[in-house]
Image (cartoon, grey):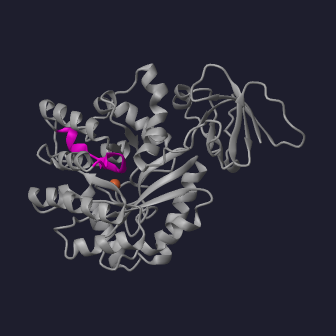
Amino acid sequence: MLIRNVYIENATTPTDVRIVDGVFAEIAPQLVASEGEQIIEGNTNLMLPPYVEPHVHLDACLTAGTPRWNESGTLFEGVQIFSEYKQLNLLSPEDVKRRATAALRLLAAHGVQHVRGHVDVTEPTLTALEPLLEVREEVRDFIDVQLVAFPQEGILSFPNGEGLLRKAAASGVDAIGGCPHLEFTRGYGADSVRLLMDVAEEYGLLVDVHCDEIDDPDSRNLEVLAALALERGMGRRVAASHTTAMGAYPDAYAHKLINLLARSEISIISNPMVNMHLGGRFDTYPKRRGLTRVKELNNAGVPVAFGEDDLQDPWHPLGNGDMLDPVWMGVYAAQLMGYDELQDAYKFVTYNGARALGVSEGYGIRVGNPANCILLDAPNFYEVLRTHAPVTYSIRQGKIVAKTQPAQTTLYI
Ligand code: FE2
């Protein structure tokens, strides 16, 4: 396959890309097509490595409106509605499989090739786990899925929380999660972080903790996670999701914490759409943005990735699998509107996501790497953001996974 005339990652001159046997074989201008070679006209499109969706709840996705809509928009009404969903016996293995597969196809259509999905393991029968493990295998050809055992109601504050977490770990999940800010006490919060790190080490798994997803300045589990990651040399295998309390911390404490985060090498996963939507709900005015300190973390060299969190579920009625949405919200909410910041913003949903998921090896458009890439209908990422440019091609191991024809408008004025 020969892809002609593309700008790789905001390069200032276009180039051609040859793929042979599913691998990037040549990257140079004006490559000559060999006989019978498949040609894709890049038309000065931007070429990026595939999008990474580092945080989405695959067990609840695509349930928005069933059995009813979340009219207040709060996290608490969302919890209530999903509880009703379960009480009505709507959550079955078939239901989970059908919705998760549909959500992953939606993500694939938008150029996503790596996904980290969370599955609640504070549901005593673990109904959603087995079907999601099956889906992970079924979709492997078009998307890589990691599953996180997510103890949504805590580990130490939920009956048999540790047992359920260990059962999920033994069942073949990729990562261990936690929810320390929702544990009964701060002591339980810190202890739950230690416990989940122990379980991850024991089973050789990655770590991704819903950490301090609350506007409480005293919710300080992230420092525990970062310290343990540093002490155990696990930083590159650990991610902290949300960390929205950082938006409420005093500056002096945040400064100290960000230094620790940088040393620990853990990744932060922010979900700008849902954090903006659900955060600041206890504030009148001034009203917090409910977001982690993306700009400061970025400047300190702490890798930050963006995710959608919820795809059309009781907590978030929107979300369409398009990674431009969290980037769009993120650059506004985190005030990243410098030209260079806008150009670089693709890294939140590409390289930083790959780093958070531990899939950086072989990721990127370089000769010798697996031929995974996307084309976007604009020459650079600033123009992608400005024009909401769609992903025109998603290519995986040298095969076209998805193709989109950009819309065309004719003016009659
Ligand atoms: Fe989440």
Residue 105 horizontal/vertical position (percent): 58, 58
Residue 213 horizontal/vertical position (percent): 24, 50
- Could one spot residue 182 in this view of the protein? yes
Whether 322 is drawn above or below 116: the answer is: above
Q: Nearer the viewer, residue 212 or 314?
A: 212
Q: Quadrant of residue 19?
A: top right
Q: Residue at x 31, y 42 (%)?
A: 276
Residue 397 horizontal/vertical position (percent): 66, 50
In this rendering, would 169 be left or right of 132?
A: left
In this rendering, would 312 be left or right of 412?
A: left
Ligand 1's quadrant is bottom left
Quadrant containing the N terminus is top right
Q: How many marks?
A: 0
- Could one spot residue 312 in this view of the protein? no
In this rendering, would 223 be left or right of 40?
A: left
**Which segment did they paint magenta?**
233-248
Q: Tell me, yes or no, whether the highlighted magenta stretch contains residue 113.
A: no
Q: Residue at x 33, y 50 (%)?
A: 238
Q: Nearer the viewer, residue 126 or 267?
A: 267
Q: Quadrant of residue 157?
A: bottom left
